[in-house]
């Protein structure tokens, strides 16, 4: 187990800024490159806010888990605003999940878990870059294309 280095709050914040910008930029860049509304700025701000709340919660009297749980709840509301239902389909679930995950990364950075945040960022980026295999059926299948059926024989009506 790697020993925790005792850093002042200000030094931890400055180091955390580097990790926040890297994490938020990488995940936000991926979402923005797909034309999603939540891009670099949104993901970086969510990650930074979660880091700040986590650092503050560690340095005040009381239960730091209470603030952490409220971060998760607040980000849930933000993510819910990204999810849209239109004509029987749902859009924005992946962006909402990436916002939620960016907050988790910010919390990890706020606790000083830098290796975990780097590995989590890389895992999220790879997952988001994976092709959409299995989400919508077999590759090459488009649900928008009508399924070809055999033509029905026309019946003659008898009068």
Image (spheres, rainbow, N blue to C red):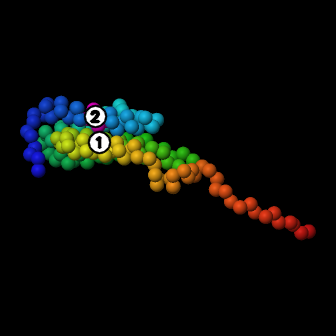
The residues bearing labels 2 and 1 have C-alpha atoms spaced at a distance of: 9 Å
Does residue 66 appear anywhere in the picture? yes
Q: Please tell me whether the stretch drawn in magenta is mainly helix, strand or loop.
A: helix
Q: State yes or no: residue 23 in magenta.
A: yes
Choose the circle earlier in sequence order: 2 or 1.
Answer: 2
Q: What residue sits 83% from the left and 66% below the top?
A: 155
Q: Where does residue 154 sit, x and y in percent of width and height?
A: 81, 63
Figure quadrant of residue 94: top left
Q: Is residue 85 left or right of residue 8?
A: right
The residue at the far bottom in this view is 158
Is residue 36 or residue 123 the one in the foreground?
123
Q: Are marks 2 and 1 in contact (CB under 8 Å)?
A: yes
Could you say whether the residue bearing mark 1 is in a helix, strand or loop? Answer: helix
Residue annotated with mark 2: 22
Could you say whether the residue bearing mark 2 is in a helix, strand or loop? Answer: helix
The residue at the far front in this view is 140
Q: Is residue 151 left or right of residue 40?
A: right
Q: Is residue 143 left or right of residue 62?
A: right
Is residue 110 or residue 146 the one in the foreground?
146
Figure quadrant of residue 47: top left
Q: Where does residue 100 sit, x and y in percent of width and height?
A: 33, 44
The residue at the far right in this view is 159
Q: Which residues are magenta?
A: 20-24
Q: Where does residue 119 sit, x and y in percent of width and height?
A: 25, 44
Q: Residues within 10 Å of mark 2 (few under 14, many from 20)?
A: some
Q: What residue sits 27% from the left and 45% below the top?
A: 120
Residue 121 is labelled as 1
Q: What residue sits 10% from the left and 34% below the top?
A: 8
Q: What residue sits 18% from the left and 38% below the top?
A: 55
């Amino acid at each position: 187990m790697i020993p925790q280095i005792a850093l002042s709050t200000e030094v931890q914040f400055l180091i955390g800024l580097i990790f926040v910008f890297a994490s938020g930029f990488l995940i936000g860049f991926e979402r923005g490159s797909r034309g999603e509304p939540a891009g670099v700025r949104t993901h970086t701000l969510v990650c930074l806010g979660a880091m700040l709340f986590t650092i503050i919660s560690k340095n005040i009297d009381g239960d730091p888990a209470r603030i952490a749980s409220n971060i998760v709840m607040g980000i849930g509301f933000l993510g819910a605003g990204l999810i849209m239902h239109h004509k029987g389909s749902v859009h924005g679930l992946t962006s909402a999940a990436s916002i939620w995950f960016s907050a988790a990364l910010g919390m990890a950075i706020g606790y000083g878990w830098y290796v975990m945040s780097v590995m989590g960022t890389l895992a999220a980026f790879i997952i988001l870059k994976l092709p959409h295999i299995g989400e919508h059926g077999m590759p090459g299948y488009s649900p928008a294309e009508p399924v070809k059926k055999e033509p029905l024989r026309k019946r003659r009506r008898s009068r």
